[in-house]
Image: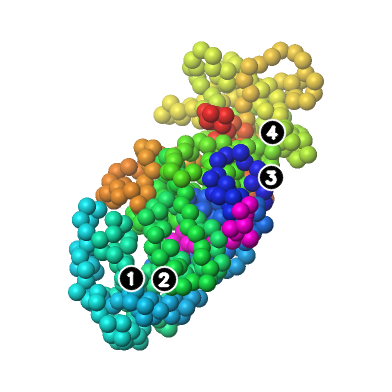
Amino acid sequence: MENKSAASNFIKTIIQEDLKEGRVQNVVTRFPPEPNGYLHIGHARAITINFELANEFGGKANLRFDDTNPVKEDVEFVESIKEDVKWLGFDWSGLFFASDYFQEMYERALLLIRKGKAYVDDQTAEQIRETRGTLTEKGTNSPYRDRPAEENLDLFERMRKGEFPDGSRVLRAKIDMSSPNINMRDPVLYRISHTHHHNTGDAWCIYPMYAFAHPIEDSLEGVTHSLCSIEFEDQRPLYDWVIQECEMPHISHQYEFGKLRIDGTVMGKRYLRQLIEAGVLDGWDDPRVLTISGMRRRGYTPEAIRTFIREAGVSRSNGTVDPRMLEHFIREDLKLKVPRTMAVLDPLKVVITNYPEGEVEWLEAENNQENPEMGTRHIPFSREIYIERDDFMENPPAKYFRLFPGNEVRLKNAYFIKCEEVIKDENGEVVQINCTYDPETKSGSGFTGRKVKGTIHWVEASHAVPAEFRLYEPILKDEEELDEEEGQEEKTLLDRINPDSLTVQQGYVEPDMKQAKPHDKFQFFRHGYFNVDPKHTSGDKLVINRIVSLKSSFDPTK
Protein backbone atom coordinates (compact mmCIF):
# COMPACT_ATOMS: atom_id res chain seq x y z
CA MET A 1 0.00 0.00 0.00
CA GLU A 2 1.79 3.11 -1.22
CA ASN A 3 1.75 6.30 0.76
CA LYS A 4 1.35 9.09 -1.80
CA SER A 5 0.60 11.85 0.66
CA ALA A 6 2.63 15.03 0.64
CA ALA A 7 1.87 15.56 4.33
CA SER A 8 4.85 15.79 6.67
CA ASN A 9 6.27 12.61 8.15
CA PHE A 10 9.59 13.08 9.94
CA ILE A 11 9.89 9.35 10.64
CA LYS A 12 9.91 8.63 6.92
CA THR A 13 12.82 11.06 6.58
CA ILE A 14 14.71 9.25 9.38
CA ILE A 15 14.20 5.88 7.68
CA GLN A 16 15.38 7.25 4.34
CA GLU A 17 18.57 8.55 5.98
CA ASP A 18 19.15 5.29 7.86
CA LEU A 19 18.89 3.30 4.64
CA LYS A 20 21.03 5.76 2.70
CA GLU A 21 23.81 5.75 5.32
CA GLY A 22 23.68 1.96 5.75
CA ARG A 23 22.67 2.09 9.40
CA VAL A 24 19.70 -0.12 8.52
CA GLN A 25 19.50 -2.81 5.85
CA ASN A 26 15.88 -3.87 6.18
CA VAL A 27 13.16 -1.86 7.91
CA VAL A 28 11.28 -3.66 10.69
CA THR A 29 8.47 -1.97 12.64
CA ARG A 30 5.84 -3.29 15.02
CA PHE A 31 2.44 -2.40 16.46
CA PRO A 32 2.51 -3.47 20.16
CA PRO A 33 -0.93 -3.05 21.79
CA GLU A 34 -1.73 -4.26 25.27
CA PRO A 35 -4.79 -6.55 24.97
CA ASN A 36 -6.73 -4.81 27.74
CA GLY A 37 -9.45 -3.08 25.74
CA TYR A 38 -10.66 -2.04 22.32
CA LEU A 39 -8.59 0.06 19.95
CA HIS A 40 -9.48 3.64 18.99
CA ILE A 41 -8.48 6.02 16.21
CA GLY A 42 -5.22 6.85 17.99
CA HIS A 43 -4.29 3.19 17.66
CA ALA A 44 -5.47 3.23 14.05
CA ARG A 45 -2.96 6.00 13.47
CA ALA A 46 -0.14 3.98 15.06
CA ILE A 47 -1.14 0.93 13.02
CA THR A 48 -1.18 2.90 9.78
CA ILE A 49 2.14 4.62 10.49
CA ASN A 50 3.94 1.37 11.35
CA PHE A 51 2.51 -0.79 8.58
CA GLU A 52 2.60 1.77 5.78
CA LEU A 53 6.20 2.78 6.49
CA ALA A 54 7.28 -0.86 6.52
CA ASN A 55 5.38 -1.54 3.30
CA GLU A 56 6.72 1.56 1.57
CA PHE A 57 10.34 0.55 2.23
CA GLY A 58 9.84 -3.15 1.50
CA GLY A 59 10.26 -4.11 5.14
CA LYS A 60 8.31 -6.00 7.77
CA ALA A 61 5.70 -4.96 10.31
CA ASN A 62 4.88 -7.23 13.25
CA LEU A 63 1.81 -7.37 15.42
CA ARG A 64 2.88 -7.99 19.02
CA PHE A 65 0.66 -8.19 22.05
CA ASP A 66 2.38 -6.70 25.10
CA ASP A 67 0.56 -8.97 27.50
CA THR A 68 2.65 -8.41 30.63
CA ASN A 69 -0.24 -7.48 32.94
CA PRO A 70 -2.64 -10.45 33.21
CA VAL A 71 -4.96 -8.63 35.63
CA LYS A 72 -6.35 -6.47 32.81
CA GLU A 73 -5.84 -8.63 29.73
CA ASP A 74 -8.10 -11.08 27.96
CA VAL A 75 -8.19 -13.20 24.80
CA GLU A 76 -11.35 -11.28 23.77
CA PHE A 77 -9.23 -8.18 23.28
CA VAL A 78 -6.57 -10.14 21.40
CA GLU A 79 -9.12 -11.28 18.84
CA SER A 80 -10.74 -7.85 18.51
CA ILE A 81 -7.35 -6.23 17.88
CA LYS A 82 -6.53 -8.77 15.17
CA GLU A 83 -9.87 -8.04 13.53
CA ASP A 84 -9.26 -4.28 13.70
CA VAL A 85 -5.82 -4.51 12.09
CA LYS A 86 -7.17 -6.72 9.30
CA TRP A 87 -10.17 -4.44 8.75
CA LEU A 88 -7.88 -1.42 8.40
CA GLY A 89 -6.28 -3.24 5.48
CA PHE A 90 -3.04 -4.54 6.94
CA ASP A 91 -1.45 -7.93 7.49
CA TRP A 92 1.42 -8.59 9.84
CA SER A 93 4.73 -10.22 8.98
CA GLY A 94 4.90 -11.90 12.37
CA LEU A 95 2.43 -12.40 15.21
CA PHE A 96 4.04 -12.33 18.65
CA PHE A 97 3.20 -12.09 22.32
CA ALA A 98 5.38 -10.59 25.02
CA SER A 99 4.54 -13.70 27.01
CA ASP A 100 6.36 -15.75 24.35
CA TYR A 101 9.56 -14.20 25.73
CA PHE A 102 8.91 -14.58 29.46
CA GLN A 103 11.70 -17.12 29.91
CA GLU A 104 14.14 -14.98 27.91
CA MET A 105 13.21 -11.92 29.97
CA TYR A 106 13.70 -13.85 33.17
CA GLU A 107 17.17 -14.91 32.03
CA ARG A 108 18.05 -11.29 31.16
CA ALA A 109 16.88 -10.20 34.62
CA LEU A 110 19.18 -12.81 36.19
CA LEU A 111 22.01 -11.37 34.07
CA LEU A 112 21.34 -7.90 35.45
CA ILE A 113 21.40 -9.23 39.02
CA ARG A 114 24.74 -11.01 38.45
CA LYS A 115 26.17 -7.79 37.00
CA GLY A 116 25.03 -5.84 40.03
CA LYS A 117 22.54 -3.90 37.91
CA ALA A 118 19.34 -5.08 39.63
CA TYR A 119 18.18 -5.90 43.15
CA VAL A 120 15.17 -7.25 45.01
CA ASP A 121 13.40 -4.56 47.03
CA ASP A 122 11.18 -5.41 50.00
CA GLN A 123 9.66 -1.92 50.23
CA THR A 124 5.96 -1.44 49.59
CA ALA A 125 4.77 0.30 46.45
CA GLU A 126 3.95 3.37 48.54
CA GLN A 127 7.42 3.45 50.08
CA ILE A 128 9.04 3.18 46.67
CA ARG A 129 6.88 6.00 45.40
CA GLU A 130 7.74 8.21 48.38
CA THR A 131 11.48 7.65 48.03
CA ARG A 132 11.62 8.19 44.28
CA GLY A 133 11.76 11.96 44.73
CA THR A 134 10.24 14.67 42.56
CA LEU A 135 11.18 16.73 39.54
CA THR A 136 13.10 19.07 41.84
CA GLU A 137 14.25 16.66 44.57
CA LYS A 138 16.53 13.66 44.24
CA GLY A 139 15.36 10.21 45.19
CA THR A 140 16.50 8.21 48.21
CA ASN A 141 18.27 4.87 47.96
CA SER A 142 16.34 1.82 49.06
CA PRO A 143 17.71 0.15 52.22
CA TYR A 144 17.88 -3.05 50.12
CA ARG A 145 19.79 -1.50 47.22
CA ASP A 146 23.16 -2.96 48.25
CA ARG A 147 22.08 -6.54 48.82
CA PRO A 148 24.72 -8.98 47.58
CA ALA A 149 24.09 -10.47 44.13
CA GLU A 150 23.81 -13.98 45.61
CA GLU A 151 21.01 -12.89 47.95
CA ASN A 152 19.20 -11.11 45.13
CA LEU A 153 19.45 -14.20 42.91
CA ASP A 154 18.04 -16.38 45.67
CA LEU A 155 15.15 -14.01 46.40
CA PHE A 156 14.32 -13.52 42.72
CA GLU A 157 14.28 -17.26 42.10
CA ARG A 158 12.00 -17.72 45.10
CA MET A 159 9.76 -14.96 43.73
CA ARG A 160 9.64 -16.98 40.52
CA LYS A 161 8.66 -20.12 42.45
CA GLY A 162 5.74 -18.34 44.11
CA GLU A 163 7.02 -18.26 47.70
CA PHE A 164 5.99 -14.64 48.32
CA PRO A 165 2.58 -12.91 48.22
CA ASP A 166 1.59 -10.21 45.76
CA GLY A 167 3.15 -6.84 46.48
CA SER A 168 5.70 -8.12 48.97
CA ARG A 169 8.76 -7.75 46.75
CA VAL A 170 9.81 -6.33 43.39
CA LEU A 171 12.91 -6.45 41.26
CA ARG A 172 14.34 -3.00 40.54
CA ALA A 173 17.03 -1.80 38.15
CA LYS A 174 20.05 -0.30 39.88
CA ILE A 175 20.73 2.90 37.97
CA ASP A 176 20.77 6.35 39.60
CA MET A 177 18.39 7.65 42.28
CA SER A 178 19.65 11.19 41.66
CA SER A 179 18.97 11.15 37.91
CA PRO A 180 17.06 14.20 36.62
CA ASN A 181 14.93 11.68 34.69
CA ILE A 182 12.63 10.02 37.23
CA ASN A 183 12.28 7.00 34.94
CA MET A 184 15.95 6.23 35.61
CA ARG A 185 15.61 6.23 39.41
CA ASP A 186 15.80 2.48 39.92
CA PRO A 187 12.61 1.60 38.02
CA VAL A 188 10.71 -1.57 38.87
CA LEU A 189 11.43 -4.39 36.42
CA TYR A 190 9.33 -7.25 37.88
CA ARG A 191 6.39 -7.54 40.26
CA ILE A 192 4.65 -10.50 41.87
CA SER A 193 1.14 -11.33 40.65
CA HIS A 194 -0.44 -14.72 41.28
CA THR A 195 -2.82 -14.24 38.36
CA HIS A 196 -3.86 -16.60 35.59
CA HIS A 197 -2.47 -15.45 32.24
CA HIS A 198 -4.50 -15.79 29.03
CA ASN A 199 -1.49 -17.21 27.16
CA THR A 200 0.81 -18.85 29.73
CA GLY A 201 -1.81 -20.02 32.22
CA ASP A 202 -0.33 -20.40 35.70
CA ALA A 203 3.26 -20.97 34.58
CA TRP A 204 4.36 -17.60 35.97
CA CYS A 205 3.59 -15.60 39.07
CA ILE A 206 6.06 -12.79 38.37
CA TYR A 207 5.57 -10.52 35.41
CA PRO A 208 7.91 -7.98 33.76
CA MET A 209 7.02 -4.33 33.59
CA TYR A 210 6.34 -2.91 30.15
CA ALA A 211 9.40 -0.63 30.21
CA PHE A 212 11.64 -3.67 30.76
CA ALA A 213 9.85 -6.06 28.41
CA HIS A 214 9.40 -3.75 25.45
CA PRO A 215 13.03 -3.13 24.46
CA ILE A 216 13.84 -6.82 24.91
CA GLU A 217 10.97 -7.78 22.60
CA ASP A 218 12.04 -5.20 20.01
CA SER A 219 15.60 -6.47 20.02
CA LEU A 220 14.64 -10.13 19.74
CA GLU A 221 12.39 -9.34 16.77
CA GLY A 222 15.02 -7.19 15.07
CA VAL A 223 12.89 -4.05 15.15
CA THR A 224 14.81 -1.19 13.56
CA HIS A 225 12.41 1.67 14.26
CA SER A 226 10.43 1.35 17.47
CA LEU A 227 7.72 3.98 17.03
CA CYS A 228 5.64 5.23 19.93
CA SER A 229 3.71 8.30 21.04
CA ILE A 230 5.38 11.28 22.63
CA GLU A 231 4.60 10.42 26.28
CA PHE A 232 7.25 7.68 26.05
CA GLU A 233 10.01 10.16 25.22
CA ASP A 234 11.25 10.30 28.83
CA GLN A 235 11.48 6.50 28.84
CA ARG A 236 13.84 6.33 25.90
CA PRO A 237 16.98 6.43 28.13
CA LEU A 238 15.62 3.41 30.03
CA TYR A 239 14.83 1.68 26.72
CA ASP A 240 18.46 2.15 25.66
CA TRP A 241 19.75 1.11 29.10
CA VAL A 242 17.82 -2.19 29.02
CA ILE A 243 19.13 -3.09 25.56
CA GLN A 244 22.70 -2.29 26.55
CA GLU A 245 22.81 -3.80 30.05
CA CYS A 246 20.84 -6.90 29.06
CA GLU A 247 23.39 -7.39 26.26
CA MET A 248 20.70 -7.77 23.62
CA PRO A 249 21.75 -9.15 20.20
CA HIS A 250 20.17 -6.31 18.20
CA ILE A 251 20.19 -2.60 19.04
CA SER A 252 16.74 -1.17 18.35
CA HIS A 253 16.03 2.55 18.41
CA GLN A 254 12.95 4.28 19.78
CA TYR A 255 11.36 7.27 18.02
CA GLU A 256 8.42 9.26 19.36
CA PHE A 257 5.71 11.06 17.44
CA GLY A 258 3.08 13.49 18.66
CA LYS A 259 -0.43 12.36 19.48
CA LEU A 260 -3.26 13.40 17.23
CA ARG A 261 -6.30 14.61 19.12
CA ILE A 262 -9.78 15.05 17.69
CA ASP A 263 -12.17 17.60 19.15
CA GLY A 264 -15.32 16.38 20.86
CA THR A 265 -14.24 12.77 21.37
CA VAL A 266 -13.75 10.38 24.28
CA MET A 267 -10.60 8.28 23.88
CA GLY A 268 -9.59 6.90 27.27
CA LYS A 269 -10.58 3.32 28.05
CA ARG A 270 -11.63 4.07 31.61
CA TYR A 271 -13.87 6.91 30.42
CA LEU A 272 -15.44 4.71 27.77
CA ARG A 273 -15.97 2.00 30.36
CA GLN A 274 -17.68 4.51 32.64
CA LEU A 275 -20.05 5.55 29.86
CA ILE A 276 -20.85 1.93 29.06
CA GLU A 277 -21.56 1.12 32.71
CA ALA A 278 -23.77 4.23 32.99
CA GLY A 279 -25.80 3.11 29.96
CA VAL A 280 -24.81 6.14 27.88
CA LEU A 281 -23.11 3.88 25.32
CA ASP A 282 -24.39 0.48 24.20
CA GLY A 283 -20.90 -1.02 24.10
CA TRP A 284 -17.32 -0.48 22.97
CA ASP A 285 -18.62 -0.38 19.40
CA ASP A 286 -21.09 2.47 19.97
CA PRO A 287 -21.02 4.56 16.76
CA ARG A 288 -20.64 7.80 18.73
CA VAL A 289 -17.09 7.02 19.83
CA LEU A 290 -13.97 6.62 17.74
CA THR A 291 -13.05 3.10 18.71
CA ILE A 292 -12.18 1.17 15.58
CA SER A 293 -15.15 -1.14 16.17
CA GLY A 294 -17.38 1.90 16.71
CA MET A 295 -16.21 3.52 13.48
CA ARG A 296 -16.71 0.24 11.61
CA ARG A 297 -20.25 -0.11 12.98
CA ARG A 298 -21.11 3.49 12.14
CA GLY A 299 -19.94 2.94 8.57
CA TYR A 300 -16.55 4.65 8.36
CA THR A 301 -14.35 3.00 5.76
CA PRO A 302 -10.76 1.88 6.31
CA GLU A 303 -9.72 3.70 3.13
CA ALA A 304 -11.04 7.00 4.49
CA ILE A 305 -9.40 6.47 7.88
CA ARG A 306 -6.03 5.72 6.28
CA THR A 307 -6.27 8.78 4.04
CA PHE A 308 -7.19 10.97 7.01
CA ILE A 309 -4.17 9.70 8.96
CA ARG A 310 -1.80 10.28 6.03
CA GLU A 311 -3.10 13.78 5.38
CA ALA A 312 -2.88 14.70 9.07
CA GLY A 313 0.86 13.98 8.86
CA VAL A 314 3.31 12.83 11.54
CA SER A 315 5.19 15.34 13.65
CA ARG A 316 7.09 15.35 16.93
CA SER A 317 4.52 17.50 18.72
CA ASN A 318 0.91 16.83 19.70
CA GLY A 319 -1.75 18.25 17.43
CA THR A 320 -5.51 18.66 17.35
CA VAL A 321 -7.70 18.26 14.28
CA ASP A 322 -11.27 19.14 13.49
CA PRO A 323 -13.49 16.01 13.24
CA ARG A 324 -14.86 17.50 10.03
CA MET A 325 -11.53 16.62 8.42
CA LEU A 326 -12.17 12.92 9.00
CA GLU A 327 -15.76 13.30 7.79
CA HIS A 328 -14.51 15.02 4.62
CA PHE A 329 -12.40 12.01 3.66
CA ILE A 330 -15.30 9.66 4.38
CA ARG A 331 -17.52 11.60 1.96
CA GLU A 332 -14.76 11.63 -0.63
CA ASP A 333 -14.32 7.88 -0.32
CA LEU A 334 -18.03 7.03 -0.49
CA LYS A 335 -19.39 9.44 -3.09
CA LEU A 336 -18.57 7.29 -6.11
CA LYS A 337 -18.82 3.92 -4.35
CA VAL A 338 -22.30 3.73 -2.87
CA PRO A 339 -25.78 3.75 -4.44
CA ARG A 340 -28.01 6.77 -3.97
CA THR A 341 -31.55 6.10 -2.92
CA MET A 342 -34.43 7.77 -1.10
CA ALA A 343 -35.44 7.47 2.52
CA VAL A 344 -38.04 9.31 4.57
CA LEU A 345 -36.96 9.68 8.20
CA ASP A 346 -39.97 11.62 9.55
CA PRO A 347 -42.88 10.57 7.33
CA LEU A 348 -45.94 12.58 6.36
CA LYS A 349 -48.55 10.80 4.25
CA VAL A 350 -49.47 12.26 0.87
CA VAL A 351 -52.50 11.09 -1.14
CA ILE A 352 -52.45 11.95 -4.86
CA THR A 353 -56.17 12.20 -5.42
CA ASN A 354 -56.16 12.14 -9.24
CA TYR A 355 -53.86 9.11 -9.50
CA PRO A 356 -55.76 5.85 -10.25
CA GLU A 357 -56.53 3.77 -7.17
CA GLY A 358 -54.83 0.37 -7.04
CA GLU A 359 -52.33 1.25 -9.80
CA VAL A 360 -48.56 1.08 -9.31
CA GLU A 361 -46.05 2.14 -11.94
CA TRP A 362 -42.34 1.54 -11.81
CA LEU A 363 -40.02 4.43 -12.55
CA GLU A 364 -36.37 4.23 -13.53
CA ALA A 365 -33.78 6.06 -11.45
CA GLU A 366 -29.98 6.23 -11.56
CA ASN A 367 -28.16 4.57 -8.68
CA ASN A 368 -25.43 7.20 -8.67
CA GLN A 369 -25.59 10.21 -10.96
CA GLU A 370 -21.81 10.77 -10.62
CA ASN A 371 -21.00 7.15 -11.46
CA PRO A 372 -23.14 5.86 -14.36
CA GLU A 373 -21.44 2.47 -14.14
CA MET A 374 -23.55 1.75 -11.05
CA GLY A 375 -26.60 1.44 -13.32
CA THR A 376 -30.24 2.09 -12.56
CA ARG A 377 -33.01 0.78 -10.33
CA HIS A 378 -36.80 0.74 -10.51
CA ILE A 379 -38.89 2.43 -7.85
CA PRO A 380 -42.67 2.16 -7.41
CA PHE A 381 -45.06 5.09 -7.63
CA SER A 382 -48.73 5.07 -6.68
CA ARG A 383 -51.56 7.08 -5.21
CA GLU A 384 -50.07 7.14 -1.70
CA ILE A 385 -46.55 8.18 -0.83
CA TYR A 386 -44.55 9.45 2.16
CA ILE A 387 -42.57 12.68 2.19
CA GLU A 388 -40.48 14.31 4.91
CA ARG A 389 -42.59 16.23 7.40
CA ASP A 390 -40.28 19.22 7.13
CA ASP A 391 -40.81 19.31 3.35
CA PHE A 392 -44.30 20.72 4.02
CA MET A 393 -45.32 23.93 5.76
CA GLU A 394 -48.85 25.24 6.04
CA ASN A 395 -47.67 28.83 6.50
CA PRO A 396 -44.22 29.02 4.95
CA PRO A 397 -41.75 31.91 5.17
CA ALA A 398 -40.53 33.74 2.10
CA LYS A 399 -38.31 31.76 -0.27
CA TYR A 400 -39.65 28.42 0.96
CA PHE A 401 -39.73 26.31 -2.20
CA ARG A 402 -41.02 23.02 -0.92
CA LEU A 403 -44.63 21.93 -0.49
CA PHE A 404 -47.34 24.23 0.90
CA PRO A 405 -51.02 24.84 0.05
CA GLY A 406 -51.34 25.84 -3.59
CA ASN A 407 -47.65 25.25 -4.38
CA GLU A 408 -46.22 22.79 -6.86
CA VAL A 409 -42.97 20.79 -6.49
CA ARG A 410 -41.23 18.02 -8.33
CA LEU A 411 -41.04 14.56 -6.77
CA LYS A 412 -37.53 13.36 -7.51
CA ASN A 413 -37.52 10.87 -10.41
CA ALA A 414 -41.32 11.20 -10.73
CA TYR A 415 -43.89 13.95 -11.33
CA PHE A 416 -44.96 17.44 -10.32
CA ILE A 417 -47.48 17.45 -7.48
CA LYS A 418 -49.56 20.33 -6.12
CA CYS A 419 -50.89 20.63 -2.57
CA GLU A 420 -54.68 20.94 -2.61
CA GLU A 421 -55.83 20.06 0.92
CA VAL A 422 -54.43 19.74 4.44
CA ILE A 423 -55.89 17.19 6.88
CA LYS A 424 -55.32 17.53 10.62
CA ASP A 425 -56.15 15.47 13.69
CA GLU A 426 -58.10 16.62 16.74
CA ASN A 427 -54.93 18.22 18.15
CA GLY A 428 -54.41 20.32 15.06
CA GLU A 429 -51.43 18.33 13.84
CA VAL A 430 -51.11 17.75 10.12
CA VAL A 431 -51.52 14.02 9.46
CA GLN A 432 -52.08 13.97 5.70
CA ILE A 433 -51.98 16.25 2.70
CA ASN A 434 -53.93 15.67 -0.50
CA CYS A 435 -52.31 16.59 -3.77
CA THR A 436 -52.86 16.32 -7.49
CA TYR A 437 -50.21 15.31 -10.02
CA ASP A 438 -49.58 16.28 -13.60
CA PRO A 439 -49.01 13.12 -15.71
CA GLU A 440 -47.26 15.20 -18.41
CA THR A 441 -44.36 16.07 -16.08
CA LYS A 442 -42.81 12.64 -15.68
CA SER A 443 -39.03 12.76 -15.15
CA GLY A 444 -37.14 11.86 -18.29
CA SER A 445 -40.13 12.51 -20.55
CA GLY A 446 -38.66 15.67 -22.03
CA PHE A 447 -41.29 17.92 -20.45
CA THR A 448 -40.36 21.56 -21.09
CA GLY A 449 -43.43 23.37 -19.78
CA ARG A 450 -43.64 25.32 -16.56
CA LYS A 451 -40.81 25.27 -14.04
CA VAL A 452 -40.87 24.57 -10.31
CA LYS A 453 -38.23 25.68 -7.83
CA GLY A 454 -38.44 22.79 -5.38
CA THR A 455 -37.61 19.09 -5.65
CA ILE A 456 -38.37 16.76 -2.75
CA HIS A 457 -37.77 13.08 -2.15
CA TRP A 458 -40.40 10.50 -1.27
CA VAL A 459 -41.10 6.79 -0.78
CA GLU A 460 -44.12 4.96 -2.19
CA ALA A 461 -46.34 3.76 0.66
CA SER A 462 -47.47 0.23 -0.29
CA HIS A 463 -43.92 -1.03 -0.98
CA ALA A 464 -42.12 1.04 1.64
CA VAL A 465 -39.77 -0.81 3.98
CA PRO A 466 -39.92 0.34 7.62
CA ALA A 467 -36.55 1.36 9.02
CA GLU A 468 -35.05 2.83 12.17
CA PHE A 469 -32.62 5.67 11.55
CA ARG A 470 -29.93 6.60 14.06
CA LEU A 471 -28.48 10.08 13.73
CA TYR A 472 -25.33 11.05 15.59
CA GLU A 473 -23.77 14.22 16.93
CA PRO A 474 -20.55 14.62 19.00
CA ILE A 475 -20.68 12.70 22.28
CA LEU A 476 -19.40 15.72 24.26
CA LYS A 477 -21.17 19.06 24.55
CA ASP A 478 -17.84 20.90 24.36
CA GLU A 479 -15.09 20.36 21.84
CA GLU A 480 -12.25 19.40 24.15
CA GLU A 481 -11.19 15.78 23.79
CA LEU A 482 -11.42 13.57 26.87
CA ASP A 483 -8.31 11.41 27.19
CA GLU A 484 -7.35 9.46 30.30
CA GLU A 485 -3.80 10.79 30.12
CA GLU A 486 -5.00 14.36 30.51
CA GLY A 487 -6.19 13.86 34.10
CA GLN A 488 -9.73 15.24 33.81
CA GLU A 489 -11.94 14.40 36.76
CA GLU A 490 -14.22 11.46 36.06
CA LYS A 491 -17.07 13.03 38.01
CA THR A 492 -17.38 15.69 35.31
CA LEU A 493 -17.77 13.21 32.47
CA LEU A 494 -21.52 12.65 32.60
CA ASP A 495 -22.09 16.39 32.91
CA ARG A 496 -20.32 16.87 29.59
CA ILE A 497 -22.36 14.35 27.61
CA ASN A 498 -24.35 15.82 24.75
CA PRO A 499 -28.02 14.77 25.26
CA ASP A 500 -28.53 15.07 21.48
CA SER A 501 -25.63 12.78 20.57
CA LEU A 502 -28.15 10.15 19.43
CA THR A 503 -31.50 10.75 17.76
CA VAL A 504 -33.64 7.79 16.73
CA GLN A 505 -36.32 8.17 14.06
CA GLN A 506 -38.77 5.70 12.52
CA GLY A 507 -39.33 6.03 8.79
CA TYR A 508 -39.26 4.26 5.44
CA VAL A 509 -36.87 3.31 2.64
CA GLU A 510 -37.29 2.11 -0.93
CA PRO A 511 -38.27 -1.57 -1.46
CA ASP A 512 -34.82 -2.58 -2.73
CA MET A 513 -33.55 -1.91 0.79
CA LYS A 514 -35.34 -5.04 1.98
CA GLN A 515 -32.29 -6.95 0.71
CA ALA A 516 -29.82 -4.74 2.59
CA LYS A 517 -27.24 -6.54 4.71
CA PRO A 518 -25.22 -5.34 7.70
CA HIS A 519 -22.51 -2.86 6.64
CA ASP A 520 -24.19 -2.10 3.30
CA LYS A 521 -23.81 1.62 2.63
CA PHE A 522 -26.05 4.11 0.85
CA GLN A 523 -26.42 7.80 0.19
CA PHE A 524 -29.93 8.94 1.07
CA PHE A 525 -31.02 11.95 -0.95
CA ARG A 526 -30.50 15.11 1.13
CA HIS A 527 -29.85 13.19 4.37
CA GLY A 528 -26.30 11.92 3.99
CA TYR A 529 -24.42 8.64 3.95
CA PHE A 530 -25.78 5.72 5.94
CA ASN A 531 -24.66 2.24 7.01
CA VAL A 532 -26.81 -0.76 7.92
CA ASP A 533 -26.15 -1.38 11.61
CA PRO A 534 -24.72 -4.90 12.19
CA LYS A 535 -25.66 -5.01 15.87
CA HIS A 536 -29.39 -4.28 15.79
CA THR A 537 -30.43 -5.27 12.26
CA SER A 538 -32.06 -8.71 12.24
CA GLY A 539 -34.98 -10.37 10.50
CA ASP A 540 -37.51 -7.71 9.53
CA LYS A 541 -35.87 -5.03 11.68
CA LEU A 542 -33.71 -2.67 9.64
CA VAL A 543 -31.55 -0.24 11.61
CA ILE A 544 -29.45 2.30 9.71
CA ASN A 545 -26.72 4.55 11.10
CA ARG A 546 -25.94 7.92 9.58
CA ILE A 547 -22.23 7.95 8.83
CA VAL A 548 -21.97 11.63 7.87
CA SER A 549 -24.25 14.31 6.52
CA LEU A 550 -23.94 15.35 2.88
CA LYS A 551 -22.36 18.75 3.38
CA SER A 552 -19.64 20.23 5.52
CA SER A 553 -18.02 23.60 5.99
CA PHE A 554 -14.58 21.94 6.18
CA ASP A 555 -12.11 23.24 3.59
CA PRO A 556 -9.41 20.63 2.83
CA THR A 557 -7.21 23.25 1.15
CA LYS A 558 -6.68 25.22 4.38
- Tell me the SS state at disc 4: loop
Residue position marked by numbered label 3 in the rendering: 512
Residue 245's disc is 2
- Whole-angstrom CA distance, mark 2 to mark 1, is 10 Å
Q: Do the residues labelled 2 and 1 touch (CB within 8 Å)?
A: yes
Mark positioned earlier in the residue sequence (3 or 2): 2
Residue position marked by numbered label 1 in the rendering: 173
- Tell me the SS state at disc 3: helix
Residue at point 59%, 50% (across, down): 17
Residue position marked by numbered label 4 in the rendering: 382
The local crowd at label 3, few if under 14, some if 14 to 19, many if 20 or more residues have their Cα within 10 Å, is some
Q: Do the residues labelled 4 and 1 touch (CB within 8 Å)?
A: no
Residue type marked 2 = Glu
Judging depth in this view, the residue of 126 and 490 nearest the camera is 126
- Tell me the SS state at disc 2: helix
Q: Do the residues labelled 3 and 1 touch (CB within 8 Å)?
A: no
Mark positioned earlier in the residue sequence (4 or 2): 2
- Whole-angstrom CA distance, mark 3 to mark 4, is 16 Å
Residue type marked 3 = Asp
Q: Which stretch appears magenta?
A: 19-40
Residue type marked 1 = Ala
Mark positioned earlier in the residue sequence (4 or 1): 1
Q: Is residue 337 visible?
A: yes
